[in-house]
Amino acid sequence: MDNRGVLVTALVTIAGIIALALIVYGITYHPAYSSERTSTKTISVASNASGQKVYHLNLNIVVEVGVGPHADWLGYQTRTNPVHPGPVFSVPRNSLVEVDIHNFDSATALRNYFFTKVQGTVGNVEYVNGKRTSIMSPDLTSHTFTIPSFGVSVPMEGVPDNAPPTKYQDMRFTFRTPNTKGVYRWQCFVPCGSGTYGNGGPMGEIGYMMGLITLT
């Protein structure tokens, strides 16, 4: 093969690698309604009574995100102005993360009662409107906040069907991140989207009911 053939082969190979990288990026991350890949700016840090740093994340579950290419999709949002996709954020490894979620959505029929249990949080509990809870009635469960790699899964209580638009249920819980850097996927495990069995739409796209957690 002459030098020209070697050059052509090299260029084709490089083009193929770039195309593959773009395909992988497109599959693994979509910017949803924000060009930012992280809502880190919305995370505050404080020290608890024992002097440990605690990373606080405040989120809403809204029936319609109201912005971007899928404005009518439901999703987790940050409680900021402007809003950011709540499912995409970054915190340090081996850190305590306290999450406060306001859920504006109603209950969803469960297919697996396993997800009514609070798992992987400090004390394996959450606080629903201030009440300590370790398991939620399946009739009340709306969504979950589930990180399989961390062993964390927390049910979200829904508002009554006749609740006004401003009504929400408040869920608070704390978990510790693993001591390993990396990017981890999480999502709601209660089918609440479109398509087959409710697993399409916001359930299948990062930035809505599915997200990424980066441990630094």
Image (tube, rainbow, N blue to C red):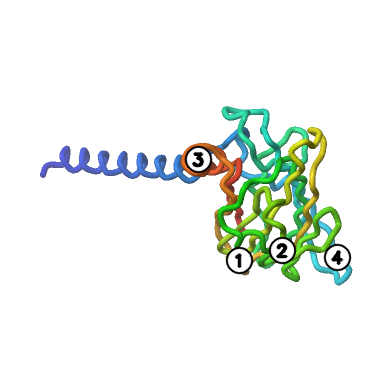
Q: Looking at the image, is mark 3 or mark 1 nearer the viewer?
A: 3
Q: Which residue occupies 74% across, 43% down?
A: 60
Point out which mark residue 200 bears.
Answer: 3
Res. 152 image quadrant: bottom right
Using a 10 Å C-alpha cutoff, classify the residue at mark 3 as few (fewer than 14 neighbours), some (14 to 19) or many (20 or more): some
Q: Identity of the amino acid at label 3? A: Gly
Query: Residue at coordinates 55% horizontally, 60% vertically from top-left?
Result: 182
**Labels 4 and 3: the sequence-earlier one:** 4
The residue wearing badge 4 is 48
Question: How many other residues sit within 10 Å of disc 4, few (<14), some (14-19) or many (≥20)?
Answer: few
Percent position of residue 109, x then y: 62, 48
Indicate the quadrant containing the N terminus: top left, top right, bottom left or bottom right. Answer: top left
The location of residue 35, given as percent across then percent down, is 60, 35
Element carrying mark 1:
loop
Distance, label 3 to label 1, CA atoms, is 24 Å
Residue carrying label 2? 135
Q: Is residue 123 left or right of residue 108?
A: right
- Amino acid type assigned to the residue bearing label 1 in the image: Gly
Q: Give the mark, 2 or 1, whose residue is nearer the N terminus.
A: 2
In the structure shown, which secondary structural element does the residue marked by tag 4 occupy? loop
- Between marks 4 and 3, how big is the CA–CA gap? 40 Å
Q: Residue furthest right?
A: 49
Mark with earlier residue (3, 2): 2
Q: What separation in Å lies between label 2 and label 4 (alpha carbons)?
A: 26 Å
Look at discs 2 and 1 and give the one toward the viewer: 2
Q: Amino acid at mark 2?
A: Ile
Closer-to-camera residue (103/52): 103
Q: Are marks 2 and 1 in contact (CB under 8 Å)?
A: no
